[in-house]
Image (cartoon, rainbow, N blue to C red):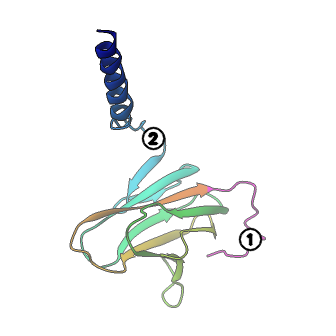
Amino acid sequence: MKKNLAYFLLVALLIAFVSSGCFKSIPQPSETTIYSSFDDIVNPPDTFQVVFAMTANTDYIAKIRFESNAVWQLDHLTSRELSIVWAERDAVEDGNRYEILNTNTRTIKVGFEGGIQYNIIARRSAFHGENINFFVQFIKKPDEDYDTHTFNI
């Protein structure tokens, strides 16, 4: 009898231990503001994300106007997609498109001038036949000086 009880307890503990890894915790809601690339983004908070809903291999443009001169860290958050991101001043016609994120550069710090509208342009580098949501995160870096930063657009 004791042997059967010991086997039962051992099996029950083993099942409990193995099954505990099968349940995923529910993700906590993020406090980060998420904008669609279809929205005009004006004076965003110090941390925000832009989602590009990509359905084809074409340019998707988010228009962003920052309140003041600042350095921002941009992070490519969608890990599996091969996408390229450029930034340009909206008012300048030629030669102002800078590649800022790609499959090799997943984070970069960029100085953006306040009061200027920028186009943040994303494109899939390859079409895989499925729609994706591509996220770029912006984090303001208040300790870094815009005037002496090496990469201002």
Q: For residue 150, which quarter of the picture?
A: bottom right
Q: For residue 38, which quarter of the picture?
A: bottom left
Earlier-in-chain disc, 2 versus 1:
2
Which SS type dominates the magenta stretch?
loop
- Residue 150 included in the magenta stretch of the image: yes
Q: What amino acid is found at the position of numbered circle 2 in the picture?
A: Ser
Residue 44 x %, y %: 52, 52
Per the rendered image, the range of residues in magenta is 140-153
Residue 7 x %, y %: 32, 21
> Nearest the camera: 44 or 117?
44
| 6 lies above or below 41 | above
Q: Which residue is mark 2?
A: 30
- Residue 52 included in the magenta stretch of the image: no
Q: What amino acid is found at the position of numbered circle 1 in the picture?
A: His
Callout 1 environment at 10 Å: few (<14), some (14 to 19), or many (20+)? Answer: few
* Residue drawn where x is 31% and y is 13% of the image: 5
Residue farthest to the right? 148
Q: Which residue is mark 1?
A: 149
Secondary structure category for the residue under label 2: loop
